[in-house]
Image: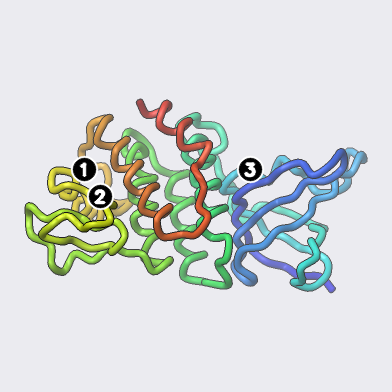
Amino acid sequence: MQEKTSAIVLHCLRYNDTSYIANVYTETVGRTSYIIKVSRARNGGVRPSLFHPLALLELEAEGKNTAQLRRVTEARLLHPLHSLPLDPFKSAIALFLGEFLHHALREEGVNRPLFAYLLHSIRWLDACEGSAVANFHLVFLMRLSRFLGLYPNLDDYVPGDCFDLLGAGFCHRPPQHGHYLRPEEAVFIPRLMRMNFGTMHLFAFNRLQRLRCLEVLNDFYRLHIPSFPQLRSLEVLQELFA
């Protein structure tokens, strides 16, 4: 039985001399993994080079969705990405977001609105030009929280409030658990929530503010997603935008 699905590549690693394992988020089965057999024939097999972070692919795999890894029998581009694999800044963002989603979506099942959001976001990143790309990952992570049920609550916000990272809302006094932002940093949460891909170029952040926002968003997800690790690609992204 052949299964066909649209997929977003999150992570791909070598399994042995002739195989790779690709971790992907798909439109029809959610988060899953496939095995890719590398053919020694010039025109045979599936090309592992297609499976770079955030690649948008159309996959065919054998077998059913079981605990056993299914083998990809055919892979082709769902939507070609022109600048993302070549631009060093965009490639660093893709590497970070691929690793981030690899852990954030570990237990995520079928969610077509989420898949559509990821697809739209990746295509936007590929087409984005100029300095606006520096804010892309901040907007992406903030809006991703809505699909994972973590979206911050702005209803009771008053300037001078703290932001409770565990409660995902604002508070007049610092919470006892210690995971919160002081008022001078909490003001960035409403600002981030107002941003979207179309307006992110209008919001100016200096280098330190952007790095701090990224650190806060990463900590926010780590507090809410079990076993979310320290990301190796985060340091690369921080150095690139330093």
Q: Quadrant of the C terminus?
A: top left
For image coordinates 38% across by 61% down, the residue present is 145
Q: Which mark is residue 203?
A: 1
Does residue 119 appear in this view? no
In x, y percent, where is residue 192? 25, 51
User: What element does badge 1 sit on?
Assistant: loop
- First in sequence, mark 2 or 3: give its number: 3
User: What element does badge 3 sit on?
Assistant: loop
Instruction: Tell me: residue 26, above or below residue 77.
Output: below
Q: Give the amino acid type for the residue marked by disc 2 in the picture.
A: Thr
In x, y percent, where is residue 125? 44, 45
User: For mark 2, what is the residue?
Assistant: 199
Does residue 242 appear in this view? yes
Q: Give the amino acid type for the residue marked by disc 3 in the picture.
A: His
For image coordinates 17% across by 47% down, the residue present is 182
Q: Among all residues in the image, which is located at the extreme right?
A: 41
Q: Is residue 144 left or right of residue 43?
A: left
- First in sequence, mark 3 or 1: give its number: 3
User: What element does badge 2 sit on?
Assistant: loop
Instruction: Tell me: residue 86, above or below residue 49.
Output: above
What is the count of numbered marks?
3
Q: Quadrant of the N terminus?
A: bottom right
User: For mark 3, what is the residue?
Assistant: 52
Q: Quadrant of residue 52?
A: top right
In x, y percent, where is residue 148? 43, 66
